[in-house]
Amino acid sequence: MLKAIGLMSGTSLDGVDVALIETDGERIGTFGPTSYRAYSDCERVLLRQALADAVSVIERDARPGALMDAELLVTRAHAEAIENFLKAHNLSRDAIDVVGFHGQTVLHRPDQKLTVQIGDGHALAKALGLPVVFDLRAADVAAGGQGAPLVPVYHRALVRLLNSTGPAMVVNIGGVANITYIDGETLIACDTGPGNAPLDDFMLRRTGEAVDRDGRTAARGRADQDWIARALSRPFFTTPPPKSLDRNDFAALSVEGMSTEDGAATLTAFTAASIAMIAPTLPKLPANWIVVGGGASNPTLMRMLGQRVAPASMIRGTDLGWSGDAVEAQAFAYMAVRSLKGLPLTFPGTTGVTAPLTGGVLAKP
């Protein structure tokens, strides 16, 4: 078993999650501590500008506009997150075998064989004095895969710990929402559509707050079902897995003419409906939907999703002893070890790649 630290900065742009696990790349041995390094308001402004500037990128190494400064920020923030993590938990640097570094996705266009995650893995390895595995999506996209979602192989390892029978469904609701369907050796995954990103962006514009805390604003509003029906008429939602999205693929869908409460309710219901639409494309209907990610902490979203997937049960990952918001950070620790061992990270059923494929680049200190 190797001790690995995983790092994740997701499309919600809230901060850096850090998690330690022990794994051999197949089994999860032990779960270690987790922590979080929030982005400041100024840092979020820079990251949002980087997202805007990334739209023009056609070469994955290009860093126009704010992207160069944002890459320095991402690298520095992740180094700070690990240094603080090691100190807070009295962990020896020598005890850590590898760091899994996802970076910050600023552009994802698999149809053009282009995916861009900013963050300098080589600089991070030097700063930490630890080996770092990074650039985990590129090999899959280069081989014709969607490059996302990457976490399903870790979801499978978590579900195997439950010793459950029948198909299981894990729903990860971050900035983008994705699912993993696990039934024995069958592994199917895809992005389902928007997660928290459209709602977060809307709330920031309307209120200055980065999120709809506890879904309170949406709970006071009324969802526009006609708007939702029009949004769901896009071909993406009836396309079977595998499929993936860029964070901004639905940015043109506007609720600006609605009140703040109704706009929040409509965007929340849109996320719930788009997740539920994946069910008819699956081999079997899972009896339980296990929800992780930031969306699991939104009671209004959970209620709306529960209504959409009934009579299936909704279970929060935290109720199973999973680490809630840190699941993706754990996943990148797990995948770093798999990468070191040459084990596959992506599969035909998860990204559409033609055969199971490993990935990642190893940076040595």
Image (spheres, helix red, strand yellow):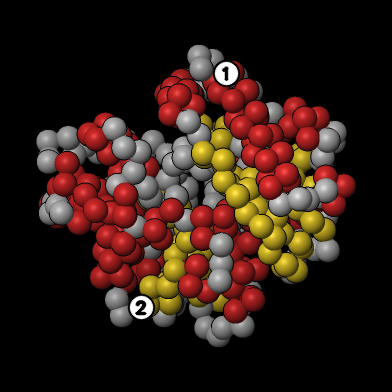
The mark found on residue 69 in the picture is 1
User: Mark 1: which amino acid?
Assistant: Asp
Q: Is residue 310 left or right of residue 152?
A: left
The picture places residue 312, in percent across and down from the top left corner, at: 35, 78
The Cα atoms of the two marked residues, 1 and 2, are separated by 46 Å
Residue shown at 71% from the left, 39% from the top? 83
Number of numbered discs present? 2
Q: Is residue 184 left or right of residue 297?
A: right
Relative to the observer, which residue lies in front, 156 or 229?
156
Residue shown at 56% from the left, 76% from the top? 183
Residue shown at 48% from the left, 72% from the top? 319
Residue 242 vertical position relative to residue 76 in the rendered view, above or below: below
Residue 345 vertical position relative to residue 308 in the rendered view, above or below: above
Residue 239 vertical position relative to residue 37 in the rendered view, above or below: below
Give residue 59's quadrant in the image: top right
User: Mark 2: which amino acid?
Assistant: Ala
* Residue highlighted by disc 2: 312
Check the picture and name the quadrant holding the N terminus: bottom right
